[in-house]
Image (cartoon, grey):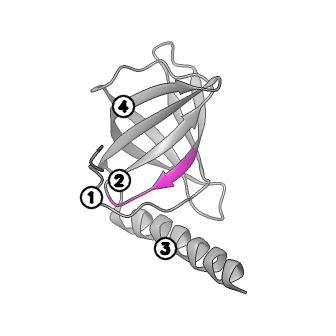
Amino acid sequence: MHADRRRCLRFSTPLMVQARDKNKEKAWGLIKDFSRGGLKVVFDEFDFDTKSFINLEIQRPNENIYIPASVEVIWKRFIEGKWEVGLSLKEFPAQVKAEILEHGYNKWVAEKAAAEA
């Protein structure tokens, strides 16, 4: 049986990210889930190798402001015409990380309450 290697809780946080590929073109993606240690992002195009370090800009919840982050590409897979990419956070402001996690947690609580109603 496959052992889950995740050490952190993940929350659905549909926020936008942008990265620059090798040709300096912006690659836009949508966060599928976010945790203390990393995030899973879905991209239409993704031109980076695993174990590479890239700079992203991650959207702040409820704002059209993007915060720089340094991440490492842990894994990537092509599914249904899109790239799912697992990224490990290396450098990202703790205050913004806490804000995103709180946003995801509040969304999870609201969805759980709605499902139980």
Q: Residue at x 64, y 79 (%)?
A: 110
Would residue 32 be counted in the magenta stretch?
yes
**5 versus 10 height, above or below:** above
- Which element type, helix, strand or loop, lies under badge 4? strand
Q: CA distance from mark 2 to mark 4?
A: 20 Å
Q: CA distance from mark 3 to mark 4?
A: 26 Å
Mark 1 against mark 3, which lies toward the viewer? 1
Quarter of the image with the N terminus in it: top left
In the rendered image, residue 10, in percent from the top left (x then y), is placed at 43, 60
Does label 1 or label 3 sit earlier along the sequence?
1
Q: Residue at x 40, y 39 (%)?
A: 86
Q: Amino acid at mark 3?
A: Glu
Q: Find disc 1 in the rendering and name its residue.
A: 7
Q: Which residues are magenta?
A: 31-36
- How packed mark 1 is, by other alpha carbons closer than 10 Å (few <14, some 14-19, many 20 or more), is few
- How packed mark 4 is, by other alpha carbons closer than 10 Å (few <14, some 14-19, many 20 or more), is some
Does label 1 or label 4 sit earlier along the sequence?
1
- Asked if the residues shown at circle 2 and circle 4 are in contact, with their CB atoms under 8 angstroms apart, the answer is no
Q: Find disc 2 in the rendering and name its residue.
A: 92
Q: Find disc 3 in the rendering and name its residue.
A: 102
Q: CA distance from mark 1 to mark 3?
A: 18 Å
Q: Which mark is residue 75?
A: 4
**100 versus 40 height, above or below:** below
Q: CA distance from mark 3 to mark 2?
A: 16 Å
- How packed mark 2 is, by other alpha carbons closer than 10 Å (few <14, some 14-19, many 20 or more), is some
Quarter of the image with the C terminus in it: bottom right
